[in-house]
Structures are given as structure tokens and as C-alpha cells.
Amino acid sequence: MDNILLKIHIISACVFVISFIVKAFLVFTGNDGGLEKYMKKMKVPDMVLSMIFLVTGVWLLINMGGLPGWFHPKLTAIVIVIPMAIIGMKKKNKLMIGLAVVLFLYIYGVAETKNPAIFTSKNAAPAETEGGESQVNGAAIYQSNCLQCHGEDGKLKMYSSPDLSLSTLDMKSRIEMITKGKNAMAGFEGRLNEAQIEAVAAYLDELRAQ
């Protein structure tokens, strides 16, 4: 059920954004006649699409099992971009429309990479303790990057993800899967450094012990 809703959510959101980009192109090229015709033609479809991705998005959010760290910037961007896009298009304000397009692309990038800092360095440094020593916290990294699909205890199985508490993979296989990814799961190579990936792989032992 969640997988179907996720696909519907992604498709409806993508079509909505593509439609907005088409309208933005017509505004920037000064094609007022084409814009008026397109907006009239897409008025109902845009309303339906926005309602679909809003309802499915709320449902997926409720059943997410917790908000990972990367999701907060994405949610903030969504709250900002929706009224900006509506107002900008109504007033044909090129600045607001341009910013809305950038934010839509940013939101898509965050959704794909699960990394809000997609335009900055990909390798985050290990967190430092109060004593100044670097310490990689596997649990914290798991909370920020894995919670959405796997849940607090690894048993959420959102989007057909496996039950991590029942995993029989050894340490080497876990590291490889986290690094390279598999099926719908994107790899974390380039987003987490080796120490962070190893810390998450080690943390999965705690989930299996629960």
C-alpha cells in the first residue's frame, strides 16, 4: 500500500513541477497568450495533481515512523515554495517564479539523495564529543538517514524495505549494501565517509539484538 502511494506521490509531484516549469518558461519568454491558454487548460489537472501529492504526502509522513534529519529542510522548502509559486505565477513575478523553480529542484534533489546539503561537501565530518575527540555515532547517523524507511527498531519496512532486525548479513555485506545500495535503496557512497558507514553497519547489530 505504502509503495503504491509513494509512486503516486512521486508521479503527481513530478508532473505538477514539470507543469510549473512549462508555465515559468512561458512567463520568461513573454508568451502571455500561450501562458493564458496553458493555465486555462491545466487549471483542473493542476488542482487534482496538487491535491493528490498533498494527501499522499501527508499519509506517508504520518506513517514514516519519525522524521529523519534530512527531511526538515525539505519540509521547510515545501512550505516556502508553494505560496511563492502561486503568488509568483499570479503576479507573473519572474524573481519569485525563478526562486520557486530552484526550490522545486532542490526539494527533488533532497528527496533523491536524502541529503539536504546537496550543493556542499558530500563527506560530513564525524561528530565531536565534549572532550574534543572524534566519535562516530552509528545510532545518530541511522536516525538521520535510515529512519524514514526502516523505523526506530528496523522493523518499519516502509517502501518494501527489509526488516533489519531479522537481517543475516555479515559486517562486510552490510557495509557494501550501505555503500552501494540495492534495489530502491540508494547507496551512501560519497554522502557518508567510511567511518560513518562502518558505524551504521555496527549499529545494525543492536537492532538485531532487540
Image (cartoon, rainbow, N blue to C red):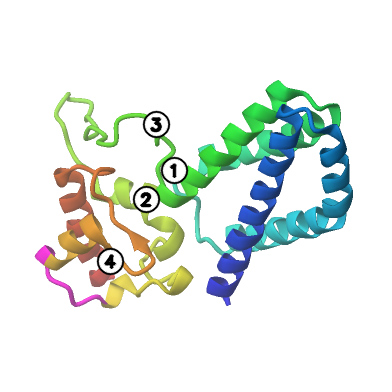
**Is 19 left or right of 47, judged from the image as shown?**
left
Q: Which residue is mark 4?
A: 207
Residue shown at the point (37%, 56%) measured from the top left: 146
Residue shown at the point (20%, 50%) measured from the top left: 197
**Is 147 left or right of 171, judged from the image as shown?**
right
Q: Secondary structure at mark 2?
A: helix
Dot 4 alpha-carbon crowd within 10 angstroms: few under 14, some 14 to 19, many 20 or more: some
Say which amino acid is labelled 2: Asn
CB atoms at circles 3 and 4 under 8 Å apart? no
The residues tagged by marks 1 and 3 sit, at their Cα atoms, a distance apart of: 17 Å
The residues tagged by marks 1 and 2 sit, at their Cα atoms, a distance apart of: 7 Å
Asked which quadrant contains residue 45, the reply is: bottom right
The residues tagged by marks 4 and 1 sit, at their Cα atoms, a distance apart of: 20 Å
Q: Which residue is mark 3?
A: 119
Say which amino acid is labelled 3: Phe
CB atoms at circles 1 and 2 under 8 Å apart? yes
The residues tagged by marks 2 and 4 sit, at their Cα atoms, a distance apart of: 15 Å
Mark closer to the observer (2, 4): 2
Say which amino acid is labelled 1: Gly
**Residue range highlighted in magenta:** 167-172
Q: Secondary structure at mark 3?
A: loop
Mark closer to the observer (1, 3): 3
Q: Which residue is mark 1?
A: 69
Residue 50 coordinates in the image, percent (x, y): 75, 54
- Prevailing secondary structure of the magenta residues: loop
Q: In the displayed structure, would residue 114 be above or below residue 95?
A: below
- Upstream in sequence: badge 4 or badge 1: 1
Residue shown at the point (29%, 73%) measured from the top left: 165
